Image (spheres, grey):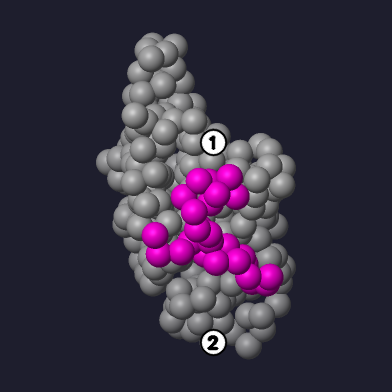
Amino acid sequence: MRFLTRLKSLQALEASARHGSFVGAASELDVTPAAVGQLVRSLEDWVGYPLFRRSRSGAERLTPVDEAQEALEDIAHGLDRLESGLKKLRGRKARSIVVVTASQALVANWLLARLNDFAAAYPTIDVRLDVSDRVIDLAQGEADIGIRCGMGSWKGVKATHLMDEEIIAVCHHRLLPPDDQVTAGWIAEQTLIHDGTPHPGGDFPTWSEWLARSGVNQASADRGLRINSTAAVIQAAVAARGVALVRKALVAQEIESGRLVHLLPEQRWPVKWAYYAVASAKALRRYEVSAFHDWLTEKPLRE
């Protein structure tokens, strides 16, 4: 005999354990926190002991007891298999949704242009984009899979390397000198666009450092336009507001189109940050998430 009458309670238990609270589970299940609490308590009455250790403060107010923690992997796997079975019942009419998160700059300058390729390869999977420059909590299910640029170590998720990154100098073609003879000295005299976005541990250069490596010790390299958004820095360069130091992958499309020009391409500045496909082990068990992950890793960002 299968105890499928407890299915909603099992869903409430599994979601509460992932989110660490009834509030987070309620948002995912589209019910009230009180309803989630009632479902969990009914399951506790059935098994005969509390399933969570409860605390009054902290990000995770619910911690599964040892017996519940041991059972949760089987419960999560079972719920995934039930969902898969329901999709098979619907056959060709079934459509899956994968929620993908990435920064504004990466979505605008790389991902959007390539989503048609994914749609052609996987016509029954719909992509929903969560465009955000903050680090979405993939381990807690805020999105299914993400593309992140960083050091490659994030808690609770698997990170698959996609490509390395480097910093380059660019400007709009209208700003080039009449003879197109670009030198480090000429760059130092232009309006310098500074990206104020934090890049901890990435070894991203300042304009002073980049110009010094090019042989120009420019005392006024801190002047110019300061912007705290990488996407806005790129847009400022496209709008011919000055010369910018940017991540190469994010402007490859603009360089290919001719709107931006890669200045002094012999000046290389690799950084420690790289691009990764990031998802939790639970999310990767789902077909649509695994398919998007495989598509990403088979189509490097540099293409």
Identify the residue shown where x is 68% and y is 66%.
Answer: 228
Q: Which residue is mark 1?
A: 8
Above or below: residue 121 compared with residue 56: above
At mark 2, the secondary structure is loop
As for residue 237 lying within the magenta part, the answer is no
Identify the residue shown where x is 39% and y is 44%.
Answer: 75
Above or below: residue 9 compared with residue 238: above
Depth order, front residue of 228/33:
33
Expressed as whole percent of the image width and height from the top left, the position of residue 177 reads 58, 59
For the N terminus, the image quarter is: top left
Visible in this render: residue 9? yes
Amino acid type, label 2: Asn
For the C terminus, the image quarter is: top left
Expressed as whole percent of the image width and height from the top left, the position of residue 204 reads 49, 74
As for residue 58 lying within the magenta part, the answer is yes
Expressed as whole percent of the image width and height from the top left, the position of residue 65 reads 46, 64
Amino acid type, label 1: Lys
Visible in this render: residue 303? no
Stretch of the chain drawn in magenta: 40-67
**Mark 2 neighbour density, 10 Å: few (under 14) some (14–19) many (20 or more):** some
Identify the residue shown where x is 54% and y is 41%.
Answer: 9
